[in-house]
Image: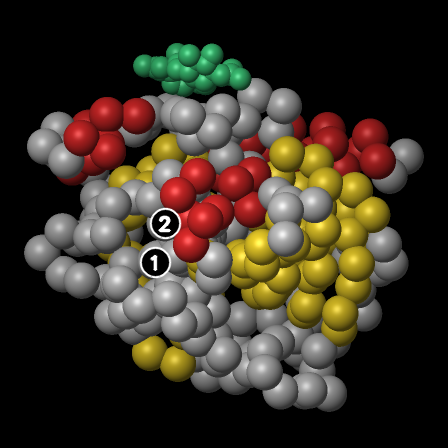
Amino acid sequence: MVTMLILILLPVAFLLPPRAGAGEIIGGKEAKPHSRPYMAHLAIQHRGDSYICGGLLVSENFVLTAAHCNGDKITVTLGVHNIREREESQQKISVRHRIPHRQYNETTLYNDIMLLELAEKATLNRWVDTIALPRTNERVEAGAMCSVAGWGCTRRGSKSISAKLREVDVVVMPDDTCLKNPNVQYHIYNSSIMMCVGDPKTSKDSWEGDSGGPLVCGETAQGIVSWGPPTPPGVYVKVSIFIPWIQATMRRLQP
Ligand SMILES: *[C@@H]1O[C@H](CO)[C@@H](O)[C@H](O)[C@H]1NC(C)=O
Ligand SMILES: *[C@@H]1O[C@H](CO)[C@@H](O)[C@H](O)[C@H]1NC(C)=O
């Protein structure tokens, strides 16, 4: 989420919508190491600042993330559990092309989606693997239980990010929970391209630094952490709407 992206540096944080730049998992627990082999750790350099985001491996050489995670330079590490350690499972790969959605709008956060073409193919193994994307326009019903993971902040108001991957279960809410929410931040919510996720009666949420990571429902990456205020619900990119864009973009770069 824009607030979810792991915002390490404050100056950038001001430019980003809540969760857009950083994020962390709130109310969750440490993930079982390597139980989510599709998770990508993104280290972002932008105008002298550093951020982190999450992403998901969709093919041997493409990672999907949020457009607000874009920067001057992005380094992808796959197979990570603890980013502060040199795990034998880790594959650090630079990015050849960053392709944010052409209609990404920093103000409305519409189309907050980006593909990263890796400079070399990842080696798929038990620590590194792809995740399935939904079918075009596939719907996730309100009430569905999904999960989100990230290396983002674990407490609101703290800038400390988590070295180890953390995860939390979150429930898909009806669109009205965001559309009719009195918090002014939700006025940009658009139910045709966004998902409203996380029960406002709980604290379970993604947060700064988690941005770009997948919302996983069953075996499928249905959402991408995008933005939200400091409390649930958070707002996720509705991935199923962007399947034609994802397929066309990958085909264009990889004839
Ligand atoms: C982003 O959306 C705002 C509000 O609808 C609009 O005024 C602005 O022109 C848009 N920016 C771009 C770059 O499309
Ligand atoms: C919501 O997004 C769709 C798809 O981009 C767009 O056609 C529609 O105009 C948007 N709705 C509003 C209220 O901006």
Q: Amino acid at mark 2?
A: Thr
Q: Secondary structure at mark 1?
A: loop
Residue with the mark numbered 2: 3
N-terminal of the pair, mark 1 or mark 2, is 2
Where residue 7 appears, x then y in whole percent? Answer: 45, 57
Residue with the mark numbered 1: 206
Where residue 238 appears, x then y in whole percent? Answer: 43, 37
Q: Residue at x 31, y 68 (%)?
A: 158
Q: Secondary structure at mark 2?
A: loop
Asked if disc 2 is less than 8 Å from ligand 1, the answer is no
For marks 1 and 2, give the CA distance. 9 Å
Res. 203 visible in picture: yes
Disc 2 crowd, CA 10 A, few/some/many (<14, 14-19, 20+): many
Against 206, residue 226 (above or below) is above
Q: Quadrant of residue 39?
A: bottom right
Foreground residue among 81 and 10 = 10
37 lies left or right of 151: right
Q: Give the quarter the ligand 1 occupies.
A: top left
Res. 130 visible in picture: no
Q: Residue at x 60, y 71 (%)?
A: 37
Where residue 52 appears, x then y in whole percent? Answer: 54, 60
Where residue 123 appears, x then y in whole percent? Answer: 81, 69
Against 151, residue 55 (above or below) is above
Q: Amino acid at mark 1?
A: Ser
Q: Residue at x 18, y 62 (%)?
A: 203
Q: Quadrant of residue 244?
A: top right
